[in-house]
Image (cartoon, grey):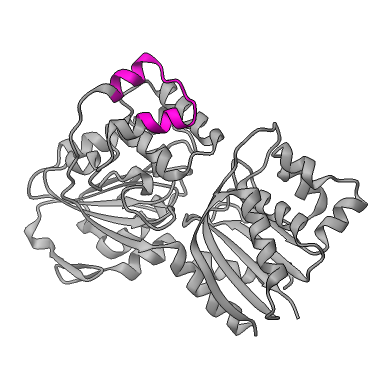
Amino acid sequence: MKFEELLGIAKEGIDAADPERAVMESVSLNDSVLSVCEESFDLDNYENILVIGAGKASERMASGIERVLGDRISEGLVITKKRLGLTERIEVMEGSHPLPDERSLKATRRVMELLNHCGVKDLVIVLISGGGSSLLCCPKVSLETFREITERLMKAGADIKELNTIRKKLSMVKGGKLAALAQGEVISLIMSDVVGDPLGSIASGPTVSDTSTNRDALEILRKYGIEADDEVIECLSSEEGVVESRAKNYLIATNRRSLEVMKEAAEKRGYSSFILSPFFEGEAAQLGLFLSAIAKGMEMRKVCILCGGEAVVNVKGSGRGGPNMEIAASFALGIDGAKASIACIASDGEDGSTYAAGAFADNKTSLRAEELGLDIKEHLKNNDTLSLFEKLGGLIVTGSTGTNVNSFWLLSIEE
């Protein structure tokens, strides 16, 4: 399948996870009755409606909830990576991602202040999406220490569940603690960026009861050989009971739903299509080889195989890149001339810390690399796939999509 055709299919799936669209398809208002998925809430029973949230998609989600509730919203504040100016009643503050900064801390404290003034007859609507772990940040330890541990775990290849276990244990708002600050009723609308959609891991579960323990956190640090300083040890050595959240949590956008839309889009273009799995996890280069093995062994022709999930990179080199570019590069090495192509795309438009969303590779990629004197293996070894695809062509650059439901890998087997 051509580069442009695969991107067109991917775009339909990304559009299906548009935050404003996801909110408005899940929430509606009829007179005073607010319907959220299959449940109803009579707004006449509440004195105030407060909207808060965090994540890369939170401002677009806020725009959707404003379109539903309008001037019924008493006050609101969401934290996002880049303010877009989409809301009127809900304030938007910026924070940092993938590591929190002073802006994240300042904005989170503002959210906490709003919740501290929330009354028992108030309704709190929380908007949560991917990136919330960094954007919504008020650590029990110093910000510098929190950032250092998070960054070291990322570079060591810790998966999102492990990262978020540490974040919850070192945080004053994650693991159900945010919802616990509110006296009134709490409704949480959640867009999943975690494989399998475990609510407690998405944005580190600020409105979800936390069953992890300090011992779990210490074992993760030991697993990756990270020696914690006295500040962290003291925090993780203290007794902490399970945090129970009274919030009602609703999942409104997932990787699987986007893959289902892509499947329909591929079939409209004349391809047999199926979803292999939305649950892929693992080291990026290995996933690329795995997908190339599927392509080489596939007897069906003109088929589009759809996968989703979250890959990680164990950073050992000094280059720039991201897991989706590494998957594409590894796929190119493993394809052995089979007539197949792959598009690897981060749904948020940001692969690693680069400006690209991912990359495209096919059975001609390795040949082009040889002609240009480029060694794909060396680029992978140095984690330098951005410069590889800048020279080869095939970079996928979408800009920020405003959503985040993991990554998509579209594998096409030609006739």
- Left/right placement of residue 292 relative to residue 281 reads right
Q: Residue at x 30, y 31 (%)?
A: 215
- Left/right placement of residue 263 relative to residue 227 reads right
Q: Residue at x 17, y 34 (%)?
A: 241
Query: Quadrant location of residue 362?
Result: bottom right
How far across and how far down the image is residue 26, in percent? 31, 68
- Range shown magenta: 218-236
Task: Specify whether residue 357 is in view.
Answer: no
Residue 24 higher or lower than 370, as above or below: below
Relative depth, front residue between 218 and 247: 218
Q: Main secondary structure of the magenta part?
A: helix
How far across and how far down the image is residue 293, in percent? 68, 63
How far across and how far down the image is residue 306, in percent? 57, 69
Query: Quadrant location of residue 107?
Result: top left
Q: Residue at x 68, y 38 (%)?
A: 320
227 drawn magenta: yes
144 drawn magenta: no
